[in-house]
Amino acid sequence: MSQPDELSLTGLAGLVAGLPTEDRARFERIFHLAVAEGRAVPPQAMKGWIAKQFGSVDAVRRQQIVRLTNRVTLEGTLFNPLRTRRPIEAPASAGEALRSAQGDKPDLEEMIRRKAEVGCSFCRPLIGTPADPFGRLRGQYAITASNVAKYDAWHGVIIFDEHHPLRFTAEQVADYVDLAQKWAHQVQQADPEARYPLLIWNCLWRSGSSILHGHTQMVVARGMHFARVEAWRQAALRYRAAYSADYFADLVAVYRALGLAVECGQATILPSLTPVKEKETHIVAPRLNADLKAALYHTLHTFVERLRVRSFNLALYQPPLGPVAEEWDGFPFVVRLLDRGPLDSNTSDLGAMELFAESVVMTDPFRVVEALRAPAH
Ligand SMILES: [Zn+2]
């Protein structure tokens, strides 16, 4: 449970008001913050259940909603602290928690093991997956394949040697990222117009992943970058034109001022104030170097081991590989990573709000940054 003096979203307005003038101005030119109260009148018959579920009936009678909008990128999120006040840290054993959360359903570990035994096409990539026209690339812990049903003309898969989708070391994660970059450069040599790479990693079925075996994917677009990446580039250009300042540098400065940044050399880890879904965390770095890879591993490890995340989506935004007509100066490498919710949930975490309006999220970014900062246990 939160202590009253703990930093949280509900105290964000006060925190912003107390910032030095320059930091506050920077926050206000990037974010719009609104706090509102929703009211409900529960019937007598519901009160017992409400008190058990939410701690008190009053917590439901008057609910504070925190709404944050990024004015630059026009991404926005509604946070309901009634839900965010719940603790998100995993109990002692993540495996135990998963079993108890899943009740009578088969244990995830058992399911993953059984799949490897009965035959997994990614366990035998040379006979179970197609190659690209230029063949396959081999890393230390992974091999590439051509996606059998493609998102776009160039769509590769980085297949991990490790079958278990939640088992990875820092060395393995760095190797997967390096191999994906090598694959993208190979694509660029084969097709010089293919210049806009995007690495994605979907883990377990809630994320949209159809294969249990650990893998990432790499897509390289032609003509222009993928729409959401291009939207950020154009937003940053507009910001520079309006304020003569670098958008991403200012964004990182805002998170630092609020105590929401974790430094990892040249890379900065930020739990997003406008997450698309639960716990969305960004890693911003000027280049794809060892700091970014270390930050990536730390964030993944925190998600899986500390925050009990089982199904996640990850993307790496990066500038184009070769020269292009439009302006990319100062566009950093940005990892986006978020949690898709418990594996046993039959309800989708994406509704009309997320698809057509703005996201509704439970987890307070101040709780995510605590987990990212906590010493390893
Ligand atoms: Zn496998």
Image (cartoon, rainbow, N blue to C red):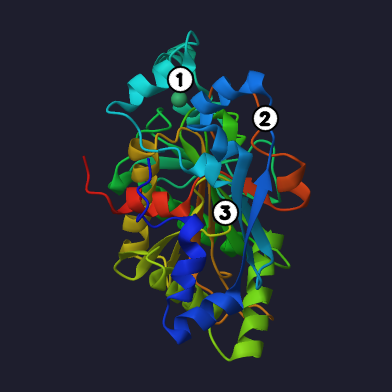
Say which residue label 1 marks: 101
Q: Residue furthest bottom?
A: 244
Q: Do the numbered discs 1 and 2 sit on residues whose CB atoms are within 8 Å?
A: no
Alpha carbons under labels 1 and 2: distance apart:
28 Å
What SS does tag 2 mark? Answer: loop
User: At label 3, which amino acid type do we have?
Assistant: Pro
Foreground tag (1 vs 2): 2
Marks 2 & 3, CB-CB < 8 Å contact: no
* Relative image position of residue 13 (x, y in whole percent): 52, 66
Q: In the rendered picture of this protein, how many numbered marks are placed on residues?
A: 3
Residue situated in front as seen by the camera: 143 or 319 = 319
Disc 2 or disc 3, which is closer to the eye? 2
Disc number placed over residue 228 in the picture, else none: none
- State which quadrant residue 341 falls in: top right
Point out the tag, 2 or 3, that comes first from the N-terminus: 2
Position above or below: 363 against 208: below
Residue 234: % across, % down: 68, 75
Judge: label 3 CB < 8 Å from ligand 1. no
Tell me where residue 233 sits by quadrant. bottom right
> Quick one: quadrant of the C terminus?
top left
Q: Say which residue label 3 marks.
A: 275
Q: Is the N terminus in the top left, top right, bottom left or bottom right quadrant? A: top left
Q: Residues within 10 Å of mark 3 (few under 14, many from 20)?
A: many
The structure residue drawn at horizontal position 32% and vertical position 29%, both measured from the top left corner, is 91
Q: Quadrant of residue 255?
A: bottom left
Which residue bears the numbered disc 2?
42
- Ligand 1 sits in which quadrant? top left
